[in-house]
Amino acid sequence: MPELNNKVALVTGGTGGIGSAICQRLAAAGARIATTYRNAEKAEAWAAEQPYEPLLIACDVGNYEECVRLKETLEAQLGGCDILVNNAGITRDATFKKITPEKWQQVINADLDSVFNVSHQFVAGMTDRGWGRVINIASINGQKGCFGQTNYCAAKAGMHGFTMALAQEVARKGVTVNTVSPGYIATEMVMAVREEVREQIVAQIPVGRLGRPEEIAGLVAFLASDDAGFITGANLAANGGQHMH
Ligand code: CAA
C-alpha cells in the first residue's frame, strides 16, 4: 500500500515549478492532492496535464479571509488536511537602495504572512486527529542572505522561526513542523534572474548545476512519511553544496 494512502495533502502554489513536483510525488505516494491557485486559466491547464486529479481551490494565501474559505472548501471536498506544504512564494528582487515599500510588503505578505494564514486553518485539525505534517518551503537565501533580496531573505528566515516555534507547540500531538531550504532550482523563478547573474550563481554550486524540482519533492515526501516522525523543527538544506552550515 502506498505510504500516504488516505492522507490529504494541501500544497500552496502547487502549479509552480517546485510545487508541481511536490504534488506529483505526494500523489504517487497515495495522497489526495489539493492546491491553491490565483490564475484560473493557468491552473486548469496545469491540472489537465497531471496524472492524478488535483482539487484546485482559488485562494490568495496572503489574505486571511480567503484562507478561511480555503479551509471550508477543502474540508467539504476532502474532509481535512493531514499534510500542509507551505510552498507558495514570490520574489521582487531589488537592491535595498531601490526597494519600494510595495515590493517589501508584497513579498512579506505572499511568503511569510501566508504561512500563518494557511497553517492557522489546518494545524488544529491535525492535533485533534493526532497526526500531521507542516512543511515550509523556504530558501538557501533565508539561510545565507542574498544581494538584492532583503524582502525575500527576511521572509524566508522568518519562515524557519515560525517552524521552530510551532514545532515545539505541537510535538506531543503527533504533528511535525519542518523547513526545507532549496538552493537554486531550475524553475521559472530562477530562470527570471538575468543570464549572466545566473551563470555566476551556478559557478558557486559545488554540484555544478541547478537543482531539479524532483530533488526537493523527494525530500518533502520523506518528511511527510511516518519514517520522519522524529524530525521536527529542522531546516533541511538541498542546495548542491552552495551553503553548508
Ligand atoms: N555582490 C556584490 N555586488 C553585487 C552583487 C553581489 N552579489 N550583485 C551585483 N552587485 C553589484 C554590481 O556589480 C553593480 O555594481 P556597480 O554599480 O559598481 O556596477 C551593483 O551591485 C548593481 O548591480 P546590478 O547592476 O545587478 O543592479 P540592478 O539594480 O540592475 O539589479 C538585482 C539588482 C535585481 C538584485 C540583480 O543584481 C539580480 O537579479 N541579482 C540576483 C538576485 C538573486 O539571486 N535572486 C534570486 C532569485 S531566485 C530565488 O530567490 C529562488 C531561491 O529561493 C533561491
Image (spheres, rainbow, N blue to C red):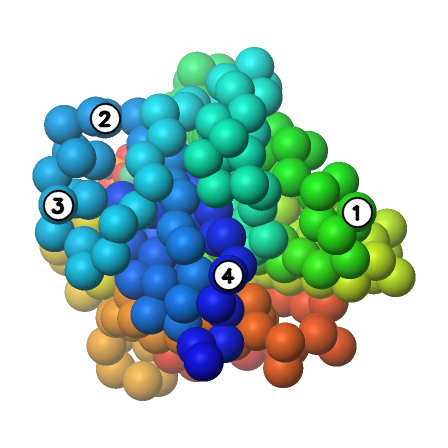
Q: Is residue 154 above or below residue 50?
A: above
| Residue 128: assigned label | 1
Q: Which residue is mark 3?
A: 48
Q: Residue at x 30, y 62 (%)?
A: 24
Q: Residues within 10 Å of mark 2 (few under 14, many from 20)?
A: few
Q: Is residue 226 above or below residue 177?
A: below
Give amino acid for label 3: Ala
Q: Secondary structure at mark 4?
A: loop
- Of 3 and 160, the residue lying toward us: 3
CB under 8 Å between discs 2 and 4:
no
Nearer to us of marks 2 and 4 is: 4
Label 1 vs label 4: CA separation? 17 Å
Residue 51 x, y percent position in the rendering:
18, 60
Residue at label 4? 6
Left or right of 240, for residue 139: right
Q: Determine crowd level at label 4: few under 14, some 14-19, many 20+ residues with C-alpha closer than 10 A.
A: few
**Whole-percent x, y for residue 232 in the image:** 73, 67
Between circles 1 and 2, the one closer to the viewer is 1
Q: Answer with the quarter of the image where residue 132 lies.
A: bottom right
The residue that disc 2 covers is 39
- Residue at horizontal 50 percent and vertical 69 percent from the top: 4
Q: Disc 1 versus disc 2: distance between alpha carbons?
A: 33 Å
